[in-house]
Image (cartoon, helix red, strand yellow):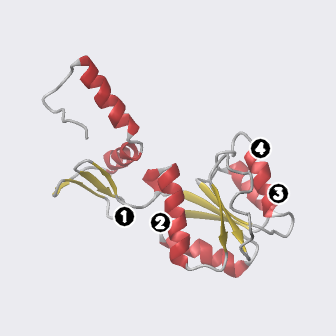
Amino acid sequence: MAASILVVEDEPAIQELVSFTCTNNGYAVRRAESARAAQDAIRHELPDLVILDWMLPDRAGIELLRDLRTDERTKALPIILLTAKPRRGTRSLGLTRAPTTTWSSRFPRAELVSRLRAVFRRRAPEHSGEALAYGSLSIDPSRHEVRVGSQAVKMGLAEFKLLKFLVGIRSVFSLAASCLTACGATTSSSRSVP
């Protein structure tokens, strides 16, 4: 399932450009044009990331951001804060409890995609859209392809999603390998974990 992004922007042209860029890169996009609409959308369904305009018609985006950071359900929600003018000191707003970054709305689209991928790579690698690797295993989500070394591996959608998720949280593999090694357990199909 594609990562979901809520775009909170009152300027129609910017909202359309940001939404189009996100959609074209495989993300599921919902839109809100005000702080109130954003709160309703988040209450209805928690997105994987929010792109939030600094100034909204009904309330400052920074105030909504502060509210989201104090709410238990949304305090760890990654947020990219859009600003028309880069402001000094906005990168460290004292809101570092969860991923928050500021970004100028006058942007190259490639930079937006890079920022989204960076946030998802840190937060949820399985949603970054980039190829994942673990030892000789590689997973390309954009082509729905799994390889071990140079050999393609055929698998169904459920297996692909599970493998992609597990490789995204590598500590599971390390823990399993450590447990097997500690117990002296091996099977004919077990391989060493890098």
* Numbered badge on residue 63: 3
Q: CA distance from mark 3 to mark 4?
A: 11 Å
Q: What SS does tag 4 mark?
A: helix
The local crowd at label 4, few if under 14, some if 14 to 19, many if 20 or more residues have their Cα within 10 Å, is: few
**Mark 1 residue crowding within 10 angstroms, few (<14) / some (14–19) / many (20+):** few
Q: How far across and down, in percent of the image, does residue 74 sit?
A: 69, 46
Q: Is residue 23 left or right of residue 46?
A: left
Q: Position of residue 65 (x, y in %)?
A: 75, 55
Residue 70, labelled with which disc? 4
Give the CA separation, mark 2 to mark 3: 30 Å
Mark 2 belongs to which amino acid?
Gly
Residue of label 2: 26
Give the spatial CA distance, label 4 vs label 1.
36 Å
The residue identified by callout 1 is 142
Q: Earlier in the sequence, mark 1 or mark 3?
A: 3
Cα distance in 3D space between marks 2 and 1: 8 Å
In the structure shown, which secondary structural element does the residue marked by tag 2 occupy? loop
**Residue lying at 47% horizontally and 66% vertically, measured from the top left:** 26
Q: Earlier in the sequence, mark 4 or mark 1?
A: 4
Residue 170 figure quarter = top left
* CA separation in Å, label 1 and label 3: 36 Å
Earlier sequence position, callout 2 versus callout 4 = 2
Q: Is residue 189 above or below residue 133?
A: above
Q: Nearer the viewer, mark 1 or mark 3?
A: 3
Mark 3 residue element: helix
CB contact under 8 Å: marks 2 and 3: no
Residue 47 - label: none
**For the residue marked with disc 4, what is the amino acid?**
Thr
In contact (CB < 8 Å): disc 2 and disc 1? yes
